[in-house]
């Protein structure tokens, strides 16, 4: 029986892998790479990680990317995953091949996590695969494919939360269960901190129910605290660098957005978006199933599905977000878009609904109902695949259309782009970016276009009402950087070199954090002596002739220790998970 189950899982994983490749066919067959609104931000991060690995020159400061302005981005934004992707970029050799590989990994990860989560709830094989396919083609995932939204990698792992939810409810406080909880939570946090913070409440109800039912309350609480500590240790590489920057610097906050404009009504079928219509259909199937067959559904499945529906409703326009927008303005920067809540609820809604109808036909012992449920799920999965293929192909065709501008292709506006010539050729259309996407010179894509993103800049005042950080950054840094020579030296040192016709104050396209060591012509400039503009660019007293500005970020020893401890902790944790999995399969 054990071998048969393993064989089924292998077959399921192979099917998911094949569907992942199928979904990539528009890119592969047209040999065309695509990008979106956040792609340049993410690509700068990935290029930075790749170059630090290639040159063995590791630093908290971005040395090779983000206009080589001395910014810190990678170390506070999914650093571990950034290095993994940087290594993949070096292996693939071009941005096009990298996109194909990473998009495939994203589809595959989303499909496999959803599949195993469904199996945890004893959903049959075919239904589990179909549910996984619907999720991997949903809005929760394709946001990265079309727009470069990084949260898709965190959302691809969210289905794994079903595992600790079931363990909590079943009062499983074993070391294996607690370790899996730690690794799952920390893995989602490594992908994106905000997604993990928003998804964490999913665990609350199953924990409370399981804890109240258990007779070993002290042991359960102690082991949960232990799991939380392990998850915290595994996340130190994300948390400590961010806390260090926030404590000692004033950082540009995320852009403020009107919450009402960021809602997503997945409760209403959308005639233009089949994937959203499918989610609406699944939502109403879940509600109808619970209303009609409440007593035949397992409590844990009710909990998972109800919480998922609550998340989807919270992200909709039914909530008075305009009032919340006015009463709690901080949420405009922190949450930005209530739709983040909806797309977190999507995978658990799909998995919970599949589990509900599995229980219904088992409770009624109806083979006909089983076949109908399986048939409907498979049809929806086929519809989801075909819908995404058509959408994907249209996007690829846009990137082959010379009439589509670069700004339109990147889903942004010209005022946040600085477009440069590529070996004397002026870039106008989105098709002009394809040579850079296929070039083995990985820097070309990063240097021909600067996409203005002021995230994490150290400034005097963090207030968008006082400073237009996007335009100030474009004017003072992005447009000025080509007037300077940038040289990266060992030990994380970045130099800006220029020639001045006369001495005096010069605004250089570089920024410095409190712990950045700044030297101008070998003379150190202490933090108290620095002068900066509204966007954080340094104002220095240049001399006539050659000038050299040197930047080197020196993190606190405690922060560095935390980063190393988290990295070592991941090695140990993954080895422990592997050993426990082998022991479980071996039966001892």
Image: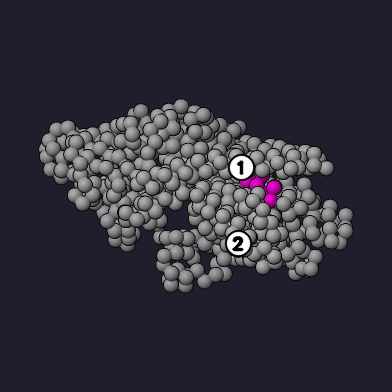
The secondary element bearing badge 1 is classed as: helix
37 in magenta: no
Which residue shows up at 54% across the image and 32% down it? 97
Looking at the picture, tell me which residue is in the foreground, 38 or 352.
352
Quadrant showing the C terminus: top right
Image location (x, y in percent) of residue 133? 68, 46
Which residue shows up at 77% across the image and 64% down it? 297
Q: Which of the two discs, 2 and 1, labels the residue nearer the N terminus?
A: 2
116 in magenta: yes
The magenta-colored residue range is 108-117
As drawn, is 55 to the left or to the right of 275?
A: left
Looking at the picture, tell me which residue is in the foreground, 18 or 177.
177
Image location (x, y in percent) of residue 363? 84, 61
Image location (x, y in percent) of residue 82? 48, 41
For residue 300, above or below residue 29: below
For residue 175, above or below residue 301: above
Looking at the picture, tell me which residue is in the foreground, 494 or 99.
494
The residue singled out by tag 2 in the image is 221
For residue 207, above or below residue 523: below
The secondary element bearing badge 2 is classed as: helix
The residue singled out by tag 1 in the image is 576
């Amino acid at each position: 029986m054990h071998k048969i189950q393993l064989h089924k899982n292998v077959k399921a994983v192979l099917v998911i892998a094949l569907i992942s490749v199928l979904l990539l066919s528009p890119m592969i067959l047209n040999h065309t790479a695509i990008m979106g609104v956040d792609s340049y931000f993410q690509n700068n991060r990935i290029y930075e990680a790749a170059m630090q690995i290639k040159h063995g020159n590791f630093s908290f400061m971005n040395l090779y990317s983000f206009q080589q302005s001395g910014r810190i981005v990678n170390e506070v934004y999914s650093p571990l995953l950034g290095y993994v992707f940087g290594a993949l970029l070096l292996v693939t050799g071009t941005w096009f091949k990298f996109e194909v590989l990473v998009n495939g990994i994203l589809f595959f990860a989303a499909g496999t996590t959803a599949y195993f989560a469904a199996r945890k709830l004893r959903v049959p094989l075919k239904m589990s695969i179909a549910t996984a396919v619907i999720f991997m083609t949903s809005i929760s995932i394709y946001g990265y494919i079309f727009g470069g939204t990084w949260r898709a990698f965190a959302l691809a792992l969210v289905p794994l939360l079903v595992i600790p939810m079931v363990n909590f409810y079943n009062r499983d406080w074993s070391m294996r269960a607690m370790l899996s909880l730690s690794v799952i939570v920390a893995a989602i946090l490594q992908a994106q901190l905000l997604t993990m913070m928003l998804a964490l409440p999913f665990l609350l109800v199953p924990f409370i129910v399981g804890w109240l039912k258990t007779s070993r309350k002290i042991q359960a609480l102690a082991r949960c605290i232990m799991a939380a500590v392990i998850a915290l240790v595994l996340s130190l590489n994300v948390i400590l660098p961010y806390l260090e920057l926030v404590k000692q610097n004033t950082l540009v906050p995320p852009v403020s957005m009107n919450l009402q404009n960021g809602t997503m009504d997945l409760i209403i079928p959308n005639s233009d978006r089949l994937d959203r219509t499918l989610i609406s259909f699944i939502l109403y199937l879940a509600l109808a199933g619970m209303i009609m067959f409440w007593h035949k559904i397992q409590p844990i499945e009710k909990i998972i599905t109800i919480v998922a529906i609550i998340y989807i409703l919270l992200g909709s326009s039914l909530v008075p977000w305009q009032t919340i927008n006015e009463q709690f303005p901080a949420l405009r920067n922190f949450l930005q878009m209530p739709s983040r809540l909806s797309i977190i609820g999507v995978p658990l809604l799909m998995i919970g609904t599949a589990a509900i109808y599995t229980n219904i036909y088992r409770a009624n012992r109806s083979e006909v109902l089983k076949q109908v449920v399986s048939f409907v799920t498979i049809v929806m999965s086929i519809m989801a695949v075909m819908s995404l293929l058509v959408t994907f192909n249209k996007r690829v065709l846009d990137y082959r259309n010379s009439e589509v501008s670069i700004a339109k292709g990147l889903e942004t506006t010209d005022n946040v782009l600085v477009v440069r010539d590529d070996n004397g050729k002026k870039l106008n259309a989105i098709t002009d970016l394809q040579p850079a996407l296929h070039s083995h010179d990985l820097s070309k894509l990063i240097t021909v276009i600067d996409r203005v993103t002021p995230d994490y800049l150290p400034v005097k005042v963090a207030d968008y009402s006082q400073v237009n950080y996007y335009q100030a950054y474009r004017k003072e840094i992005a447009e000025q950087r080509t007037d300077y020579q940038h040289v990266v030296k060992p030990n994380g040192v970045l130099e800006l070199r220029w020639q001045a016709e006369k001495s005096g104050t010069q605004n250089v396209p570089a920024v410095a954090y409190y712990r950045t060591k700044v030297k101008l012509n070998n003379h150190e400039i202490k933090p108290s002596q620095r002068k900066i503009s509204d966007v954080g660019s340094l104002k220095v007293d240049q001399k006539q002739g050659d000038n050299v500005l040197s930047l080197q970020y020196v993190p606190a020893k405690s922060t560095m220790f935390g980063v190393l401890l988290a990295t070592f902790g991941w090695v140990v944790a993954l080895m422990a998970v592997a050993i426990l999995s082998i022991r479980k399969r071996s039966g001892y």
